[in-house]
Structures are given as C-alpha cells and as structure tokens.
Amino acid sequence: MNFAALVEPIYLLSAILFVVGLKRLQSPATARAGNGLAALAMLLAIVATFADQEILPWTGILIGIVLGGSIGGIAARFVEMTSMPQLVGIFNAFGGGASALVAVAEFVASPAVGLSTPGITIMIGTLIGGVTFSGSFIAFAKLQELMTGNPIILPGQNLLSALLLLSVLTLGAATLGVFGEGDPLILFYAFCGLSLLLGILLVIPIGGADMPVVISLLNSYSGLAASAAGFVIGNMVLIISGALVGAAGLILTQLMCKGMNRSLANVAFGGFGGSASVDRADIGQRPVRSADAEGAAAELGYVNSVVVVPGYGLAVAQAQHELRKVGDLLEDRGVDVRYAIHPVAGRMPGHMNVLLAEADVSYDKLYDLDEINDDFVNTDAVLIVGANDVVNPAARDPDSVITGMPILDVDRARRVIVMKRSLSPGFAGIDNDLFYLENTLMFFGDAKASMSDLVREIRELA
C-alpha cells in the first residue's frame, strides 16, 4: 500500500474537521463535540506527517500518542476550573515554542538561506513563536500568583518595547544578510533571545484585570506562529489550522475588548488592573446591609423572577453544583430563573459558561449581557455569586477607571443579593458602589458553604 498517496486526502479531511470543529464551538451545546473533532483533525494530521516523512516507526508514533494523550487526559481531569486560564496559558506557550523550534531547526539546517521567502518566513515564525512562548509564561505566572498581578511598568516602558521591537527586526534583517556579511548563526541566536525578551516586556505591564484579553491574544499568536511554521516546512494543514486559530483568537480578543469598552492598544499599553492602580483607602468604609441564608431564601423564594450572575468567586469556591440546586428549588416554587453571563466574567473567555455547563445548567437559561440587560428593571431579585467589576455601577461614572465598561445593570432590579467573602475589590482594584445601595443585601461567607445553607433554607420555606 502506498501511504504517500493517502497523505493529501488525510490533510484535506483534517482541514475540514478543523473548520467544522471551530464552527461547533459557537454554541455551548455543541462545543465539546467541536473540540473533539478538532482534536481528531490534529491527531490525523500528526500521524500522517510522521508516517509520510518516516520520522518515527509506527511503534514510536503509538507511544507518542499514548504519552501525549495521557498527559492531556490527566491535566483535563485534575486541573480545577479556577486553574484553567493558567493551563490555557501554558498550552499557548507550548504551541508558540513548538512553532518557534520548527523555524529554528530549519534555519540551523540552512543558515545561508539569505533574504528569501523561506528566510523571511523563518524569521516571522521565530519572532511570533518566541514572543508567544515567553509572554504566555509571564501570563501564567501572573494568574498563578507566582509574581504580582499588578502592572509592572518600567521607566519608558512603551519606548523601551518599541526600541526592542525595532532591534529585533533589524537583527532579523542582518541575519538574512541585508547589511552585508556576518555569522548568520550568531545573529540568529541573538534574534531568538531578543524575541523572548520582547514577549516578557509586552506582558509584564498588563494587569490582572486584562488577563482574559491577554490569554485570547496569546492564543491568536500561537495560531499565527503555527501557520508560519507551516509555511516554513510547506505543510498545508498546519497553515490552515494555524490560520483558523489565529483568526479566531483575534476575533475573540476584539470581542473581549468590546466587552470592556477598551481598545487593544489601551490593554497592551495602558497598564490597567491590579491593586496598585487605585487608592484603596476608602474601600469598604461605607455602611452595608447584610443578610443571612434565611433572609436571602425569603427574598428569593417569594418572587416571580430571579436572575443569577456568576463570577470568578463561584469558580474559586466550586459552588456551581450547589447553585444549580438553588435554581432547581426556586423553579419548583414557580420562580423564573435565568443566568446572566458577562463576556469578561471570570479569568478567561467563556469561563462562566463552562462552569455552569459542568453543573448541568440548561444552556437555554444562559443569557449574555445584550440579551438580558434591559430586563433587570423588571426583575424581582438578582443573586450575584462572586462577581464584582462586571456589576459595578461606577462604570457609569465619568471619573471612574472603568468608565464606559459595559456592565450588567443589576442595580436596577428590585432586590440585589451579593454573595461574597468580603468587600474586597475585583481585578480593577476599585470599590463597588453596588454593595452600598439601599436595594442591596450582602450575604458574606464562602460561596459553597453559603449556597448549601441557602439550599437548606429554601427547602424549608412554606
């Protein structure tokens, strides 16, 4: 059997599966199947490439599949939802690093490639891959709190980054012989080092509030790096898959920026987010109205409509299953229960959707900001679980640091119940005016324990 004749059809099938898989990611109901199709597409492409190029024997390919699948399965099984953004950051880093290594290997094999299409492609793949690799690990360190989540802004930060980018481009041109003779390998290694440094400098000035945007942007970078690697080695399926990931990442980044009412340039160069960005002296100094589980149950159990707003605190407490029980009990009492999802709630795009799907909350009960915002004025009660900045009315204040950020207008409901450990600020580092309004009750405590108490009290309602 001539396996080489099957390679192109397998690549075509892989490309189709990538497109279909990406299409199915549009809906939470089909996202898992879409992800599986994309994974199958990548598996087919990898096996076909290894077998066609005779890089490894079939036994070696099988061992690689088993090892890689085991590592991925263990990570998927044991990494908690609160750590998913960090895991995505590491995956972005590995993807960018792998693409950069492909380009590096090609250049080392042919250092005299010169100013040509292959040479330029190698430089582009190395640059994007290197920036993605180092930048993603910085994002991981910030999210994992291995380093401060506050913006780290060096003197002349933006000018320094611009000069470094110019130096990288100049060094890349020198490596390809634009400025005359020189040892291409030494110049190329310096080019690789500066590319890694550029990735670090581009991410350290970005604060915790913007990490969801950074994660999606770095995901786009990893796709572009993979596409560039495809051009380097002439692999069509790698070009297609990388382009799809890159385009999807850019679209998602744009949507995330829209959800924060900020431009990508403002995210990249604004140094926004983290506790150092504002004066915290007055946070939590105003009086609030508190409620316990019994009072919250009474507020929720005798109304017609409730909207639940989940946030990162829900993920931290792993209280999504208890929250679903609350929703089911309220529905048994005839209450209309819906869930409002802000586009930047949590630490990565779609964080809350995945969290609620894990608890088997029906997809048709999830509403995004544009779909539900006008309904809050007619809503009897809103239950906020761990959300902060995305429900802060300060966004309507022209003097606030989150001015113009689209928020869920929960303060316009008749009653608001906020489940939170304390009055501490969110990622933006500012006080939340919602906590002090007359129609707001603060239900302090761990979300999971408090939700369990709430379940018990609702069951005991007449």
Image (cartoon, helix red, strand yellow):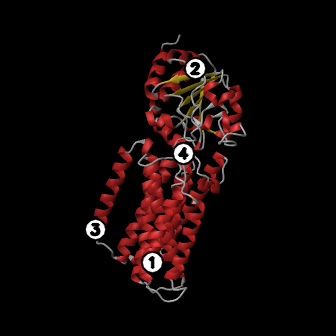
Closer to the eye: label 2 or 1: 1
Question: Which percent across, then down, holds residue 283?
Answer: 57, 31
Q: Residue at x 54, y 41 (%)?
A: 275
As measured in the structure, the alpha-carbon distance from the residue carrying label 2 to the one carrying label 1 is 64 Å
Q: Residue at x 51, y 44 (%)?
A: 347
Residue in the foreground of this view, choosing between 428 and 130: 428
Do the residues under discs 2 and 3 have CB atoms within 8 angstroms? no
Q: Which residue was labeled with disc 3?
A: 60
Closer to the eye: label 1 or 4: 1
Q: Earlier in the sequence, mark 2 or mark 3?
A: 3
Question: Which percent across, then down, holds residue 260?
Answer: 64, 46
Q: Which residue was labeled with disc 4?
A: 350
Do the residues under discs 3 and 1 have CB atoms within 8 angstroms? no
Q: Which residue was labeled with disc 1?
A: 188
Does residue 20 show up?
A: no
Determine whether the residue tagged by mark 2 lies in a helix, strand or loop: helix
As measured in the structure, the alpha-carbon distance from the residue carrying label 2 to the one carrying label 3 is 59 Å
Look at label 1 and name its amino acid.
Answer: Phe
Q: Earlier in the sequence, mark 2 or mark 1?
A: 1
Q: Which residue was labeled with disc 2?
A: 300
Residue 402 falls in image quadrant: top right
Does residue 168 show up?
A: yes
